[in-house]
Amino acid sequence: MTVAKFRGLDETNLKELGKTLVKYLRGRETLVLVGELGSGKTTFVKGMVGGMGLNEDVVRSPTFTLMNVYVGRITIYHLDLYRLEKPDFLLFDVESLIEEDEGVIVVEWGDLYENFWPESSIRVKIEIESENERTVTLEIPEEVNYLVEAVREFEEKVQGS
């Protein structure tokens, strides 16, 4: 597993990380977003959607809709499990998306069901440092080690700014 940690990221950096990562996704990946309320999980997804050439302003937290779908180069299934209990979650039929669909699953509060996700899931932990700064830790399993290139590209962008 590769672990990368970025400190002092602002909202623009958080979006840029999502935008950079989505360029390297091939489909069939699962990203588990971890962080407290207001940490920037949806902001990260906005960057991913913007990175596919779509309008990032359409991205909303799916807390009440449960799942939003963004279709671009790849399809992103954006889920939020914050207010769900396990029976509701199973009705979602997320398992069939994981097994059969070519899209990417991006799940906020996925850590509430840690053992449900594939072992190859990418974990994105967003921690609040201050009102405007975040620390992001990416855990990239060996099965998706091609995403390490996205980490390198993002590091270069952050160092250059």
Image (tube, grey):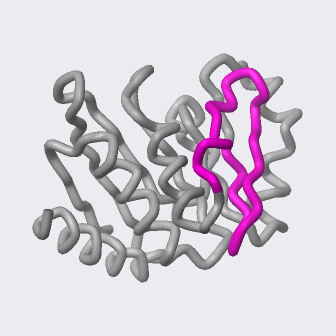
Is residue 60 covered in magenta?
A: yes
Answer left or right for 32 relative to 53. left
Tell me the residue at 60%/78% (across/down). 26
Tell me the residue at 15%/42% (across/down). 8
Q: Is residue 63 above or below residue 21?
A: above
Answer left or right for 108 relative to 79. left
Picture quadrant where residue 150 is located: bottom left
Tell me the residue at 67%/69% (across/down). 28
117 or 33: which is nearer to us?
A: 33
User: Residue 80's x, y, as percent?
Assistant: 64, 32
Tell me the residue at 72%/67% (across/down). 72
Picture quadrant where residue 153 is located: bottom left
Q: Is residue 14 above or below residue 53?
A: above
Question: Total marks drawn?
Answer: 0
Image quarter of the C terminus: bottom left
Q: Is residue 145 above or below residue 16?
A: below
Image quarter of the N terminus: bottom left
Answer left or right for 136 relative to 98. left
Is residue 62 covered in magenta?
A: yes
User: Residue 119's x, y, as percent?
Assistant: 53, 60
User: Residue 4's x, y, as percent?
Assistant: 23, 61
39 or 49: which is nearer to us?
A: 49
Q: Which residues are magenta?
A: 55-78
User: Residue 53's x, y, as percent?
Assistant: 61, 67
